[in-house]
């Protein structure tokens, strides 16, 4: 590859020693020089190809620290119930989508939120059967922790009145003991295994274009082994344009250890990531594990999806095999137990363990996270999406909720992502949420718990260098400096000069990964 000079830009490098520049020289996949145009061209020599960025602002490539790219890829051609406001509206969309599918196909998608329906109603299989009696239907809720299934799907999964609740899950039943079609947490796993799509490679190829267009150059993928296989096929075919740090599902941990997989294995395009473990559920499903009951639900403090002793055993097994651990924890009790379990396995050199979401913590646990070096892998848009839920369900609890400022102040490493398709993968929505703590319409005025807001520079660092740090890749990614990978984006809005409202509407003009333009508007 010839030498290239990207010039005429307002470059924000993320490098504290050299925070702004006007040009960059790229040699192969790496940056050779970053500085003024004269400095850079002198290093690059006379034969370099000049690429003019037309005065655009340039940022390090954005890195999503928690995204389900297979689910996101599938959601691009699945039924989307996020904006539905009644049960009847949801059923009408399911019926319309069913007409487009071939016989025997699964109808998937979902992202429904019955808390927002008018009136709020817990759906059941009979309503789905009324519009889709033959095709199996399995629709995850917006938080992904509850699945709404029809009778055909339950039949295929072998779930009936005689099926016991699995550990860490619930098959919701009617008064006579029949499953209603609502499956919570691990009870939905048999359905998820059946919902695997055969053409995932094609879907991921299309989805990476969407992600590149949003300014994402790297992802921590949290989906399954089918997703790993599809990415490796894309890599082999030379069709992978996005860098992937690939998590291992908990159920595959033993097999991954037997294969000799270790966190960090691979190359700069595809590496093995941490094992993903669930410790609890989600707030929207009323299943996150709390130390006190939810408001108005005296018998419900959530679900411990993986009991504490099992967490300690799993963490130890993974760490001994050189595999980092990323544990989903949303409720304060779940977070407390996960921190206890990380403490119990002791120091594990070279592995950066993480808590995914880390939404509601006991205030005293922030300093414990910092002391143990646990990364908080968080999704800023969850905060602004959940404002009403937190205010109603967790009223009166003494919590540090989405405590980004509190975490940074005590030294907890922050890594930002989207959790797409739970939220949209647009990283500029995350930056807006992190610096304002308001919804896109500006409410609530002044921000929700505004003392936890970040500066734009801090938010951007969490979405670039912070995500790279979580993956052990901070020596190669997240900063535009000589020797680092040439992953960067040119955007139409300078986040350091424009208002958060303008940043929310940012359009990416050019996405460069490994020194090559991979997407252009």
Image (cartoon, grey):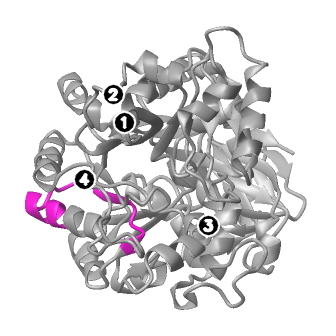
Q: Residue placed at 51% from the left, 23% from the top?
A: 151
Say if the magenta span includes residue 14: no
Which one is in front, 117 or 146? 117
Element carrying mark 3:
helix
Give how far apart the Cα atoms at labels 1 and 3 are: 36 Å
Q: Earlier in the sequence, mark 2 or mark 3?
A: 2
Residue 400 quadrant = bottom left
Question: Which residue is disc 1 drawn over?
Answer: 176
Give how far apart the Cα atoms at labels 2 and 1 are: 9 Å
Q: Nearer the viewer, mark 4 or mark 2?
A: 2
Q: Nearer the viewer, mark 1 or mark 3?
A: 1
Element carrying mark 2:
loop
Residue 187 quadrant = top left
Magenta region, residue range = 340-360
Residues marked 2 and 1 touching at CB (< 8 Å): yes
Q: Residue placed at 39% from the left, 32% from the top?
A: 178
């Amino acid at each position: 590859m010839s030498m290239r000079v990207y010039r005429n830009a307002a470059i924000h490098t993320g490098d504290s020693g050299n925070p702004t520049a006007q040009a960059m020289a790229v040699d192969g996949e790496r940056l050779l020089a970053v500085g003024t145009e004269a400095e850079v061209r002198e290093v690059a020599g006379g034969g370099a190809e000049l690429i003019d960025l037309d005065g655009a602002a340039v940022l390090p490539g954005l890195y999503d620290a928690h995204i389900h790219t297979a689910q996101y890829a599938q959601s691009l051609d699945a039924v989307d119930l996020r904006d539905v406001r009644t049960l009847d509206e949801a059923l009408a969309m399911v019926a319309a989508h069913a007409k487009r599918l071939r016989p025997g196909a699964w109808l998937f998608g979902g992202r429904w939120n019955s808390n927002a329906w008018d009136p709020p109603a817990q759906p059941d299989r009979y309503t789905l059967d009324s519009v889709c009696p033959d095709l199996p239907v399995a629709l995850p809720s917006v938080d992904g922790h509850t699945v709404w299934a029809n009778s055909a799907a339950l039949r295929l999964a072998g779930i009936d009145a005689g099926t016991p609740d699995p550990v860490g899950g619930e098959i919701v039943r009617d008064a006579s003991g029949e499953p209603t079609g609502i499956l919570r947490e691990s009870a939905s796993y048999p359905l998820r295994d059946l919902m695997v799509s055969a053409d995932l490679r094609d879907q991921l190829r299309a989805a990476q274009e969407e992600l590149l267009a949003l300014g994402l150059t790297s992802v921590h993928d949290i989906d399954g082994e089918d997703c790993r296989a599809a990415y490796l096929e894309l890599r082999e075919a030379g069709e992978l344009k996005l860098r992937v740090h690939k998590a291992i599902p908990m159920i595959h941990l033993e097999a991954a250890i037997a294969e000799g997989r270790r966190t960090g294995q691979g190359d700069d395009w595809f590496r093995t990531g941490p094992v993903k473990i669930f410790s609890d559920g989600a707030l929207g499903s009323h299943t996150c594990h709390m130390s006190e009951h939810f408001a108005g639900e005296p018998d419900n403090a959530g679900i411990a999806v993986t009991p504490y002793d099992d967490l300690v055993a799993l963490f130890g097994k993974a760490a001994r095999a050189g595999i980092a651990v990323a544990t989903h924890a949303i409720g304060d009790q779940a977070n407390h137990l996960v921190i206890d379990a990380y403490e119990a396995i002791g120091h594990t050199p070279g592995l950066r363990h993480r808590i995914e979401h880390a939404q509601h913590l006991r205030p005293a646990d922030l300093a414990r996270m910092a002391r143990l070096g646990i990364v908080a892998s968080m999704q800023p848009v969850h905060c602004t999406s959940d404002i009403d839920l937190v205010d109603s369900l967790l009223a009166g609890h003494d919590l540090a909720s989405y405590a980004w400022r509190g975490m940074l102040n005590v030294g907890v490493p922050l890594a930002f992502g989207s959790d797409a398709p739970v939220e949209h993968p647009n990283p500029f929505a995350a930056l807006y949420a992190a610096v304002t703590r308001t919804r896109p319409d500006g409410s609530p005025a002044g921000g929700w718990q505004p003392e936890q807001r970040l500066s734009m520079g801090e938010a951007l660092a969490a979405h670039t260098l912070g995500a790279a740090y979580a993956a052990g890749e901070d020596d190669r990614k997240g900063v535009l400096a000589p020797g680092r990978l040439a992953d960067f984006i040119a955007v139409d809005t300078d986040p350091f000069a424009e208002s958060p409202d303008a940043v929310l509407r940012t359009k990416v003009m050019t996405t460069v990964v490994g020194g090559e333009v991979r997407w252009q508007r």
